[in-house]
Amino acid sequence: MTGRRQAPGAEPWNTDTQLALDAGVRRLVTALNAHGFQTSDSGDGRSKWLDGSADETCLDIPHVAIGLKAAHQIIVESQRLLAVLDALALPGTEFQVQATYDPRDHSAVIMVYGLADGALRP
């Protein structure tokens, strides 16, 4: 995916992979990986426009994509993700969690929309 920085997925999680993330979702993506979620794409909805690297694939809102190895766990993992996000986010913060399953290739993705580092508890 051009224009978007990829989170580490199966790669080792280290300082270099953290620094490659958009600054506005770096803490969020790091926390999700620490909770065992395998993030695959993320963006803060502004960095790419500020540095001139935005293209038609970039979203203009904060987002994090999480891939699932076992698609049948989409409901359980979505509920677990929501519990983690509720604990991380400041009270009253609004965001969305959406889960998608594609029966053609048996892939499952959970998306978080509208939550950035500025809305996380210290």
Image: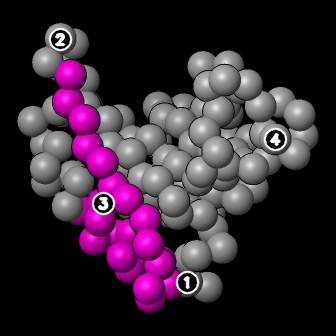
Q: Earlier in the sequence, mark 2 or mark 1?
A: 2
Numbered badge on residue 92: none
Q: Amino acid at mark 2?
A: Arg
Task: Give the quadrant of the N terminus.
Answer: top right
Front disc: 2 or 1? 2
**Closer-to-camera residue (68/13):** 68
Q: Are marks 3 and 1 in contact (CB under 8 Å)?
A: no
Q: Is residue 31 above or below residue 103?
A: below
Task: Judge whether residue 86 is colored magenta.
Answer: yes
Residue lying at 39% horizontally and 69% vertically, measured from the top left: 85
In the picture of the structure, the residue carrying the numbered disc 1 is 121
Mark 3 or mark 1: which comes first in sequence?
3
The image position of residue 78, as x and y in percent, is 23, 54
| Residue interval drawn in magenta | 80-102
Q: Is residue 106 above or below residue 100?
A: above
The answer to which of marks 1 and 4 sits earlier in the sequence is: 4
Residue at the spot of label 2? 104
Instruction: Work out whether 22 lies above or below 26.
Output: above
Q: Which residue is mark 4?
A: 49
Q: Nearer the viewer, residue 12 or 7?
A: 7
